[in-house]
Amino acid sequence: MEAPKRKVDVVVPDRATALSIQLAQTHDALRDRIRALRRQLAAGNLSDDSAARTALLAHCVGFCDALDIHHIGEDDGLFPALRREFPELAPTVDKLAEDHWLIAGLLRRVRDLADRAAAGADATSIVGELDGLMAIMDSHFAFEERRVSAAIDALAATRDAIGADRWLAAWEA
C-alpha cells in the first residue's frame, strides 16, 4: 500500500526541506560512505602495522555505528509516528523494522571481521560482507523511500517529536 496523500494545512517551521528529501540525502550519504569503504578495503593497501590500516578499520566500525544509529532512530522515532498517523502503513513499517533487524546482524558480522582484522587477520574478508550489506541497503532504502516518503512529509509531528536528528544526521557520525 502506498502512503496516502494528505493535504497539510500547517507549515512546520523546523522543516526547511521536506523530510523525505532529507531522508533520501541521508541514504545517499550512507551509500557513498559504504562504497568508498569497500573500494579502500578492496584496494588492499593494508600492511600489518600501518596507520592507514588502523584508520580504515576504525572507519569501517564508524560506518556500522552510523547505520545502526540511523535505523535505531527510525525505529524509535519515525516508525511510531508513522504508525500513529498512518495505521494503514503498519505492514510496510513492519517490513522496514524487520529489515533493520537483518541489517543489524550483518553489521555485527562486519564489526567482528574488523575487530579480527585489527588483531592481524585478513581485512579483505570484510569486502564480501560489505557487498552483501550494500545490496540489502540499496533495496531497503529504495523500498523505504518509495513507500513512506509521502507519509513522512505529511506527518504532523515536529522533527524533535520524531527524533529526526538521529535518523537524518547519523551518516555524519
Image (cartoon, rainbow, N blue to C red):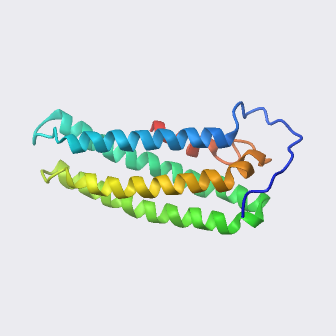
Residue 81: x and y in percent read 72, 55
Q: Is residue 2 above or below residue 13?
A: below
Q: Is residue 30 above or below residue 105?
A: above
Q: Which image quadrant for residue 45?
A: top left
In the image, is 41 to the left or to the right of 85? left
Q: Is residue 5 above or below residue 101?
A: above
In the image, is 156 to the left or to the right of 135? right
In the image, is 166 to the left or to the right of 59? right
The image quadrant where one finds the N terminus is: bottom right
Residue at 62 percent across and 38 percent down: it is 22
Residue at 71 percent across and 30 percent down: it is 16
Number of numbered tags placed on the structure image:
0
Residue at 47 percent across and 36 percent down: it is 172
> Front-most of 138 and 124?
138
**Outermost residue, right side:** 9
Residue 77: x and y in percent read 64, 53
Residue 143: x and y in percent read 58, 56
The image quadrant where one finds the C terminus is: top left
> Front-most of 3 and 13?
3
Q: Which image quadrant for residue 62?
A: top left
Residue at 25 percent across and 36 percent down: it is 55
In the image, is 88 to the left or to the right of 33? right
